[in-house]
Amino acid sequence: MESIIVALASLLAGFVDAIVGGGGLVLLPALFATFPAAAPADLLGTNKSAAIWGTGVATWQYSRRVVLRWPTLLPAAVAAFVGAFAGSWTVTLISADILRKLLPVILLVLLVYTLARKDLGRIHAPRLAERAEMQAACAIGLLLGFYDGFFGPGTGSFFVFLFVRVLGYDFLNASVSAKLLNLSTNGASLILFAAKGHVWWHFTLVLALANVAGSVLGARLALKHGAGFVRIIFILVVGVLILKTGYDAFVR
C-alpha cells in the first residue's frame, strides 16, 4: 500500500515538474506523510533518486521539439552543479531557518509581478548577446544551484522566472531550459545523498517509473499548448508554493 501511495505521488510530481517545476511540492510531503519515522535525509535522497529520471526524460522530450541554446545552457548547467554541491555542503554548517521565513514573501513578490505583467513570457525574444547571455545564465545557475542544495523548494519556478525576466525567454523555452539546469542540480544532490547512504534504492525503480510516466504526459501537454499554458501552470504552482511554504514557516 505504501508503494502505491508514493508511486501515485511520484506520477503527479513528474507531471507538474515537467511543465514548470515544483514536483517536490507533491512527492516530498507524500514521502514524509507515508514514512513519518524515517530520517529526513533518507526521504530527500529518495525523492532525488526518482525526480532525476523524470526531469531527464522531460529534458530529452523538449530537446527534440524546442531548439535549446546549448552554448548558454551547458556552462550554466555546470555552474548549477557546482552551486548545488556548495549549497549541500553549506547546509551541514548553518541553519536554513532564515530562508524558510523569507521564501513565501519572495514567492509572493514573484507571483504579483507575473500577474501584473500580463505580457511577461508570452513571446520568446532573447535580449542579450551570446556571451552576455551565457554569463547571466551561469550566474543564475550558480545562485539557484546553491539554493537548491541548501534549501530547495521552488527551485524550478525560480529558474523559469529568471529565464523569462532576465534573458527574455517565453515560458515554454524558459521551462525547457530550467529542466536542464534542474537535472544538473538534482544530479549533484543525488551524488551527495547516495555517497552518504541516504537513498532507499528499493523504492527508486517504482518511483522513477511513475515519475517518468507523469513527466512524459506533462511535457506533451506543455509542447502542445505552448507558452500560455505553461504560464498558467506556473502561476498555479507558485500560488500553491506560497501557501505551503507560508504554512511551514509561520504556522506549523
Image (cartoon, rainbow, N blue to C red):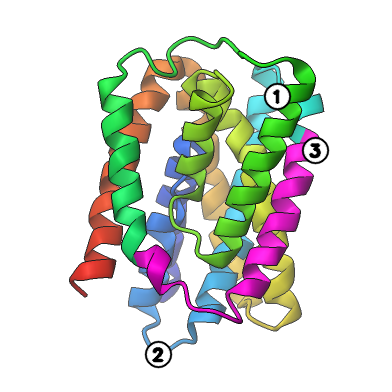
Q: Of label 3 and label 1, which has the lower sequence position?
A: 3
- Residue 37 — which label? 2
Residue 89 vertical position relative to residue 129 in the rendered view, above or below:
below
The residue mark sitting in front, 2 or 1, is: 1
- 149, 203: nearer the viewer: 149
SS class, disc 3: helix
Q: Of label 2 and label 1, which has the lower sequence position?
A: 2
- The span from disc 2 to disc 3 (Cα, nearest Å) is 40 Å
Q: Which residue is mark 1?
A: 133
Residue 121 vertical position relative to residue 190 in the rendered view, above or below:
above
Q: In the figure, residue 109 lies in which quadrant?
A: top left
Whether residues under marks 2 and 3 lie with C-beta atoms below 8 angstroms apart, the answer is no
Secondary structure mainly formed by the magenta segment = helix
| Residue that sits furthest to the bottom in the current view | 37
Q: Which residues are magenta?
A: 74-100
The x and y percentages for residue 162 are 52, 33
- 131, 161: nearer the viewer: 131
- Amino acid type at mark 3: Pro
- Amino acid type at mark 1: Glu
Pick the quarter of the image with the N terminus: bottom left
SS class, disc 1: helix
- The residue at the point 48 percent across, 42 percent down is 158
- The residue at the point 38 percent across, 17 percent down is 228
Q: Is residue 163 visible?
A: yes
Q: Of label 2 and label 3, which has the lower sequence position?
A: 2
Q: Is residue 195 left or right of residue 158?
A: right
Residue 179 vertical position relative to residue 164 in the rendered view, above or below:
below
- Amino acid type at mark 2: Ala
Q: Which residue is mark 3?
A: 75
The x and y percentages for residue 3 are 45, 71
